[in-house]
Amino acid sequence: MSTSEPVPAVRPARPDYLNASYGVRSWLLTSDHKRIAILYLITVTFFFAIGGVAAALVRLELLTPAGDVFQAETYNKIFTTHGIMMVFFFLIPAIPAVLGNFLVPLMIGAKDLAFPRINLLSWYLLVIGGLIALWALIHGGLDTGWTFYTPYSTVYSNGWVVVTAVGIFIAGFSSILTGLNFIVTLHTMRAPGMTWTRMPLFCWGMYATAIIQILGTPVIAITLLLVGAERLFHLGIFDPAQGGDPVLFQHLFWFYSHPAVYIMILPAMAVISELVTAFSRKPIFGYKFIAGSSIAIAALSFLVWGHHMFVSGQSVYAGLVFSILSFMVAIPSAIKVFNWTATLYKGSVSYQTPLLYALGFIGLFTFGGLTGLFLASLGLDIHVHDTYFIVAHFHYIMVGGTIMAYLGGMHYWWPKISGKLYPEYWSRVSAWVIFIGFNLTFFPQFIVGYLGMPRRYHQYPEEFQVLNVMSTAGASILGIGYLIPLVYFIWSMRYGKDAADNPWGATGLEWQTPSPPPTENFVETPVVSGRPYDYATGREEVALG
Amino acid sequence: MSAHGKGHGGVGAYIGVFLTLMALTLLTVWAAYQHLGIWNTPVALGIATTKAALVALIFMHLKDSPKLTAMVVGSSLLFLAFLIFVTASDYLTRKWVPIYFR
Amino acid sequence: MASPTHAALAHDDAPPELRHHFPDLAKQREASSLGMWVFLVTEVLFFGGMFLAYAIYRETHRRAFEGASNLLDLKLGATNTIVLIVSSLTMALAVWASGRSRKNATVLFLVLTMLLGATFLGIKYVEYKQKFERHEVPGPHFVVPQDEETHQPLPRQSEMFFSLYFCMTGLHAIHMIIGLGLVSWLVVRARRGEFSERYNTPVDMVGLYWHFVDIIWIYLFPLLYLLGRHTL
């Protein structure tokens, strides 16, 4: 690992947020955004592990064409557990609640988020919601898939729909409060001189994400509430027998759940913008376009939900409009990809681990995005709807995109978070293992889906077995790839070398304060005087004081 | 936001708004019994929106709030409109038959 | 925006209400106010989902909805509308009084607001009880009601109207109960003299919430109680 400044052999102990106080109480009652980020890190890692185990069981069942490991209903419960844990309790909170919580105040020179106690409350809500949902999924089971489509969820399913919905409802408040906190913080807590156009792109991404969390999440909350009321009190809001329309549920559900995809991917894009510029030693290409495209994606994301409903019975004309609007989302997404590659062009690129993840992200996200255009086309979607093609598509975005970026960001900011360096060799190994394992898992699914294998069944015709064996083998490699960073991150906390304040020689306020930062973040409130990512002039953008 | 919650409106304005709200409530009940054809609902919603705007502008001090607050309110209404009108566009065109099916 | 020297100075004689990460009370108030408005945005979309369901079904089952709507008790609904408007006035006056350090007036207006809120819920209880007695509550015990005028049974979808009626007014009532809790918390703090010209943010914020719940009712009243009256 290259360091821009020598690390002193013995560093004098100085107070930081980790050693400021000790004991479980000091963590569970903390209002320090950095400690809350650590709490989130542990929590989402736990939920990721649960979702990962469920994924492993799904792949195990699909190793052979016959349904020989689980019964159909058990299989349905397992993929539902996988979906709900990963979507609501890992992907949505992962980057905003862990990296965003840690970095937003540091990046804008604030002492904390605007509402520190609400920040802690939102962590408790995620934990409580997650445990309720987990209990329901394991104890009672739920076989509706993470989408809760009516009338199956309201009338026919024997699963624990209501309890799971309550868990997601509670976790939804966690998401809303995090978004609210970010919006208010970014509006009111920026350091002197930190204008909107001097703000790091990570913060722009968090802002765009927060907008979606605020505007979208309440709608899923009311939708799940109505589903719960329908089950508990036999109301008929989505029941055709009483004149209700199950398609209305899908409208309400996807009004949130499509933008929720952008709650997952916008923070990932925000991380990549930071990584690409830091490791190509160049100012980012087209700062304003990247910032603006985040907001554009956030706004457009609310107008495309109908592309999930092309075969649901919605009107042909609505499908047409949704299809056109869905194509339009490609524009701001492509702007980002082109700007990242333009930033890399002729940069002095150093292939450190975070950049490996970032490059993986750019490739896989582009692939996932382009196959998204297939799915946005009305005609083609009817062919591949509810097949493994769509499964592969959204895993390229969610896993190849979001998780790649999350891991890249974790590596990039780990020296700041923990004050320690991770082992360079193993981190490169894990990056490659994950990349290879990922592609081996999901690329065959594009083919098998295009050939017509439907999703959400525990059996399949024998002609699909080769591709499914490849997929399961890839999933095993991917699983090992995820375990390696888990091991060496924990290892490095005790045995890792001490990190310098700015090990990457990067710009940005978070690198101007010690690693790990003191509880108050900055000894003195910083004053910002220049553009972000000022690598070209070779001087720091920020004067402390 | 240096006004510290004082000075907005004042008691006089509050009473004025209150009386207007009362009058509008009576008006909307009266209007509901009139045969206005398709206009019954628009009139009712128009009166409700006027009442809501009065509450927001005066009771909630939106009139004296920073532009940002107005933007926040505006964005909530914009996205509510997206939700309602885009969904309605599906229901309103459900019965349209594509030309090649005719 | 606060200058850095201002930020450094602020904590020497910091007022007790100032949280450590804000430079001054004005900034803290700005953040609270923005936070509350953003929260109300989420509430708009929360109720928005049900308004959407109402709009769609009201268009598809117009006759059932108009007939069922006429079965609601307009007198009680209108009374409740007036009660809520008066409570909004008293809440606005409570904010006004707390911002002028008038402790007794603040307490008085807050208590009045609570009484009016409780009155609203009481009337709501009477209405709900009527619905139960007449088997107009959706679910297994629902009996399709008769039209007010023609005494013919209403279309089957009238049950949908009552489903939405109970969901919408029920959720609104839950918000009223939360509001009552918040106002009673304010009464305790106001009696202790915690609010003054310098700091009355909690009263201001709860006020915003209370007015917002009033606005929801302003829309619920014509949509639920008045939509079919012209057919009578």
Image (tube, rainbow, N blue to C red):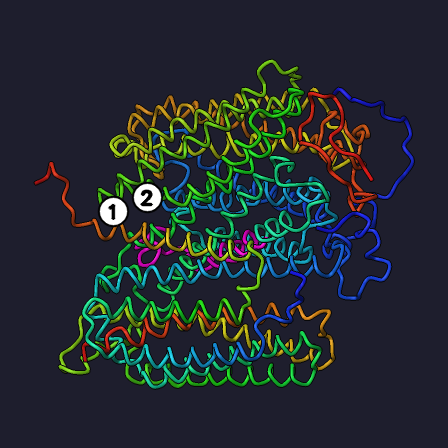
What crowding class fits label 1: few (fewer than 14 Cα within 10 Å), some (14-19), or many (20 or more)?
A: many
Magenta span dominant secondary structure: helix
Callout 1 touching callout 2 (CB < 8 Å): yes
Span shown in magenta? A148-177
The amino acid sitting under disc 1 is: Gln
Answer with the quarter of the image where residue A230 lies: bottom left
In front here: C61 or A26?
C61
Is A203 left, or right, of C140 in this rendering? Answer: right
Residue name at image x 66 percent, y 25 percent = A278
Which numbered marker is on residue B15?
Answer: none
In front here: A292 or C17?
A292
Query: What separation in Å lies between label 1 and label 2 (alpha carbons)?
Result: 8 Å
Q: Secondary structure at mark 2?
A: helix
Q: Secondary structure at mark 1?
A: loop
Instruction: From the top left corner, tell me how far across and down residue C139 is, in percent.
Output: 30, 71
The N terminus of chain A sits in image quarter: top right
- Classify C186 as above or below A481: below
Chain ID, mark 1: A
- Classify B79 as above or below C15: above
Instruction: From the top left corner, tell me how far across and down residue A151 is, in percent.
Output: 30, 55
In front here: A392 or C195?
C195
Give the residue at mark 1. A314
In front here: A423 or A260?
A260
Instruction: From the top left corner, tell me how far across and down residue A289 is, in percent.
Output: 52, 31
Give the residue at mark 2. A306
Residue name at image x 56 percent, y 82 percent = C114
The amino acid sitting under disc 2 is: Gly
- Classify A378 as above or below A208: above
The reply to whether residue C90 is in sight is yes
